[in-house]
Amino acid sequence: MNENVLDVLMYLFEHYMDDETEAEPDRQDLQARLQEAGFPSHEIDRALGWLDRLVSEEPVAAHVGSEAAQRVYTTEEQGRLDLEARGFLVFLEQNGLLTTGTRELVIDRVMELDGDEIDLDQLKWVILMVLFNQPDDSIAYSRLEEVVMSDTAPALADYLH
């Protein structure tokens, strides 16, 4: 298996994060279950650390009058997020699914992941994980979840109306 942190996170998210029927497993139980699923220990530790940092971070507060401001991406961010991914972030922000703060949290979480470039599908998973951990973003989370979880997802614009 050649799994990375994002693979572990996606597995966790699909199997445990949104499961309301089961009590929340503790860290040792999660580690054991992930090892049984075939993930390497070092990737499990890194993924759980990534989640710990996500839960402990709060979005950057938006400043009054910042709606007209544009986000300028660093060279490193541009290398990780291609034009399509950056455009998707702008689209979500313009349509109220991301705030300035949650966008920054998404970018921060993406920059901590392995790999060179994050594709659009991977970015959607990161956004879901961030929105899932933001109590005020449950509507945005639900709308985006429908798109990510559907095998034949219609255009995101269909969910914004």
Image: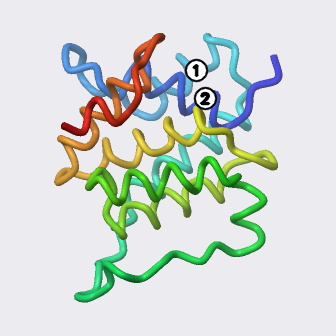
Rendered residue at 79%/45% (across/down): 115
Which is nearer the eye, 64 or 5? 64
Task: State left or right for residue 13 relative to residue 83.
Answer: left
Which is nearer the eye, 46 or 99? 99
The circle drawn on residue 83 is none
Identify the secondary structure beneath mark 1: helix
Rendered residue at 44%/45% (across/down): 127
Mark 2: few, some, or many residues within 10 Å (few <14, many ≥20)?
A: many
- Residue 119 vs 28, above or below: the answer is below
The circle drawn on residue 34 is 1
- Residue 76 vs 86, above or below: the answer is below
Q: In terms of image quadrants, where is residue 132?
A: top left
Say whether marks 2 and 1 touch (CB < 8 Å).
yes
Q: Amino acid at mark 1?
A: Leu
Report x, y in % for residue 80. 73, 55
Report x, y in % for residue 39. 69, 21
Which is nearer the eye, 37 or 85? 85
Task: State left or right for residue 114 relative to residue 34.
Answer: right
Quickly name the residue at label 2: 8
Report x, y in % for residue 138. 19, 42
